[in-house]
Amino acid sequence: MLLSKEKKPLWVENKASRNTEKLKQVWATLQPDSCPFRYNFHLHTSCSDGQLTPESLIEQAIQIGLQGLAITDHHSIDGFYRALSWMKQKKEVNSSISLPHLWTGVEITSELNGTIVHILGYGFDPHATAIRKYLGGYKPEGYDAQAQEVINCLHNAGALVALAHPARYRRPAEELITEAHLLGIDGVESYYAYGNPQPWQCSPKQMNVVESMAKKYNLYSTCGTDTHGNNILVRL
């Protein structure tokens, strides 16, 4: 289908959502206190298993002055499209409004050497053929669920790839990060609040382990609240 010159789809208009160079620059500056008031790269909406609508999520992001974020719904990009559309409408009504930088994002359930893990992808082209099979709203199975295949497909779609909450799985974070590194992963979620504390606070014990592994393998450290409830400042 040919696209009209007068009306391009939002994902074409908003190349910023696929700006991985800017994302790398941001990730290189992240600290334990960067989340949740400046950056948040792990957020869920009602388009997967979260309670907030994408529109409400962005409203909260604006209210707290968030500088950048990614909606990482499970196996879906629908929340990103709705959030992007809402931001575009806001800008048309008020051109002076300050909006956060929104990157494409997704969380994919994967198998890493027999262990179920979650892999996060950022800044990808949502229309890339390589990633289409992971955006149908359901968990991948078989070969498609293997971490190597997930990482490769995300990279082929232009994504930066990170291992979510490495200290939440059945095996030690050190082992999983080493294996993910060997498969070509770009980063790990170093700054994460295990145990759902309120207010949100990065868990120092797990952070020290994950952050040290990130430095060992020259991986980026990411951050996020993993919001599933009605407040983007906490997980639930």
Image (cartoon, grey):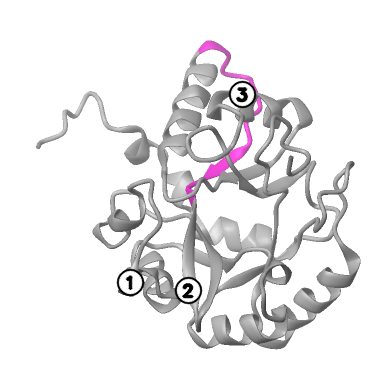
In this rendering, the answer to whether 216 lies above or below 78 is below
Q: Position of residue 85 (x, y in %)?
A: 44, 26
Q: Picture coordinates of residue 231 (x, y %)?
A: 73, 32
User: Looking at the image, is mark 3 or mark 1 earlier in the sequence?
Assistant: 3
Residue under numbered circle 1: 142
Neighbour class for label 3 at 10 Å: few (<14), some, many (≥20)?
Answer: some
The prevailing secondary structure element of the residues shown in magenta is loop
Q: CA distance from mark 3 to mark 1?
A: 36 Å
Between 14 and 122, the one nearer to me in the picture? 122
Q: Which residue is mark 3?
A: 56
The residue mark sitting in front, 3 or 1, is 1
Category of crowding for the residue at label 2, using alpha-carbon neighbours closer than 10 angstroms: few (below 14), some (14–19), many (at least 20): many
Q: In this view of the protein, which residue sits in the foreground, 20 or 1?
A: 1
Question: Considering only order in the chain, which callout, 2 or 3, is on the residue closer to the N terminus?
Answer: 3
Q: How many marks?
A: 3
Residue tagged by mark 2?
Answer: 111
Q: Amino acid at mark 1?
A: Gly
Q: In the rendering, at what x and y percent does residue 120 appear?
A: 53, 60
**Quarter of the image containing the C terminus?**
top right
Q: Is residue 22 magenta?
A: no
Instruction: Describe residue 216's horizontal placement relative to residue 149 as left or right.
Output: right
Q: Relative to 12, does residue 207 appear above or below in the rendering?
A: below
Q: Amino acid at mark 2?
A: Glu
Q: The disc labelled 3 sits on which kind of residue? A: Ser
Q: Residue at x 55, y 24 (%)?
A: 55
Calculate the distance from the C-alpha at mark 3 to the C-alpha at mark 2: 32 Å
Where does the image place residue 204, in percent across and percent down from the top left? 90, 66
Secondary structure found at label 2: strand
The residues colored magenta run 93-105
- Residue at 42%, 50% in the rendered image: 75
Q: Which mark is residue 125?
A: none
